[in-house]
Image (tube, rainbow, N blue to C red):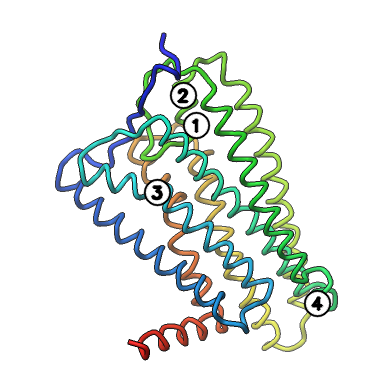
């Protein structure tokens, strides 16, 4: 029986068997990475440079773009390296770092999406109290709480997972290090503590989900009471991008981890893992920039200024 101290590396799931497909996957991942870097980088630059975008909604959007960038930079570069050099190895410490940072950025993203929902709720349902409830100091405190709670969550899970003895080899059924696949390598009697932590965190996440649902019920009730069609359209235009991002983020994660075992297969699991760990980070900037006229105008102004300088 081996334990974690005797394992120096893990074997990640190969994205393809043939060399041609490996190079194709490398090119696809490179394109996805560049799209995510460009989209999120433009949003960060636009919000940071555009003084008219220094509002709570865009402040949290900047934080969301940072979490998207961090998330995709945690998983994709190693997958690109493995595809390019036809290898599956990741070191034990590298795997631990990947688990920590992926959990950190994904947890921060969900916390920020919950806070952004609260911002939309206050803006539409309690507009007279927006300046009081969402002042600059309150926004900074909420963002700091999101990042701090994500850090503690990632640290707790990573420390607990990598303290478990591993008895089932070192081959992971995933293209990046993820806790459920590491638990499959652990001794059966030693998993209960981590499963208990997962249940507690999942309960907190479900509470955030219920808060988002309740908030949007109140938001839509308030929007439908707005007498003018232009006012309703303006309110919906600020809510729909956030609702689309939340739906994409939650639906992909829930389907990947809660799907029936009867439809599970290695190729489907791989496709779903890419769907929730890579695709939302690429689409989020597109969803927000297409629907938000102020952000779109700021992005166009930023790009135009860059071209004029060169």
Marker disc for residue 184: 2
Task: State the image quarter where residue 19 is shown.
Answer: top left
Classify mark 3: helix, strand or loop: helix
Q: Quick one: label 2 or label 4, which is nearer the N terminus?
A: 4
Instruction: Please say if the residues under marks 2 and 1 sit with CB atoms less than 8 Å apart.
Output: yes
305 over 159 or under it: above or below: below
Q: Residue furthest bottom?
A: 308
Image-based side of 208 in relation to 151, left or right? right
The residue indicated by pointer 1 is 180
Mark 3 vs mark 1, CA separation in Å: 15 Å
Q: Nearer the viewer, residue 291 or 32?
A: 32
Few, some or many C-alpha atoms within 10 Å of disc 1 (few <14, some 14-19, many ≥20)?
some
Disc 2 and disc 3 in contact, CB within 8 angstroms = no
Sooner in the amino-acid sequence: mark 2 or mark 3: 2
* Residue at x 48% of width, y 52% of height: 71
The foreground one among 62 and 8 is 8
Spatial CA span between label 2 and label 4: 49 Å
Q: CA distance from mark 2 to mark 1?
A: 7 Å
Query: How far from the left and from the top, in percent, is residue 219?
Result: 74, 69
Circle 3 Cα neighbour tier, 10 Å, few/some/many (<14 / 14–19 / ≥20): some
């Amino acid at each position: 029986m081996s334990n974690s101290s005797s394992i120096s590396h893990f074997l990640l799931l190969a994205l393809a068997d043939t060399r041609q497909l490996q190079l194709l996957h490398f090119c696809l991942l490179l394109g996805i990475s560049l799209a995510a870097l460009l989209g999120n980088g433009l949003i960060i630059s636009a919000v940071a440079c555009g003084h008219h975008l220094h509002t709570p909604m865009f402040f949290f959007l900047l934080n969301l773009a940072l979490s998207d960038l961090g998330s995709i930079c945690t998983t994709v570069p190693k997958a690109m390296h493995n595809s390019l050099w036809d290898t599956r190895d990741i070191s034990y410490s590298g795997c631990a770092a990947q688990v920590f940072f992926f959990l950190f950025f994904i947890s921060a993203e969900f916390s920020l999406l919950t806070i952004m929902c609260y911002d939309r709720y206050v803006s539409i349902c309690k507009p007279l109290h927006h300046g009081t409830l969402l002042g600059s100091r309150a926004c900074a405190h909420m963002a700091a709480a999101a990042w701090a709670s994500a850090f503690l969550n990632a640290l707790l899970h990573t420390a607990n997972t990598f303290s478990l003895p591993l008895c089932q080899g070192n081959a992971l059924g995933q293209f990046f290090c993820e806790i459920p696949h590491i638990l499959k390598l652990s001794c059966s009697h030693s998993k209960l503590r981590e499963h208990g932590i997962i249940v507690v965190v999942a309960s907190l996440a479900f509470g955030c989900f219920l808060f988002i649902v309740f908030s949007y019920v109140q938001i839509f009730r308030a929007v439908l009471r707005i007498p003018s069609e232009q006012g309703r359209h303006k309110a919906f235009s600020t809510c729909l991008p956030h609702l689309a991002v939340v739906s994409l983020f939650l639906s992909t994660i829930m389907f990947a981890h809660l799907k029936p075992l009867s439809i599970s297969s290695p190729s489907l699991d791989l496709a779903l893992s890419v769907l929730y760990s890579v695709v939302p980070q690429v689409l989020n900037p597109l969803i927000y920039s297409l629907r938000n006229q102020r952000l779109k105008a700021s992005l166009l102004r930023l790009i135009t200024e860059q071209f004029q300088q060169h």
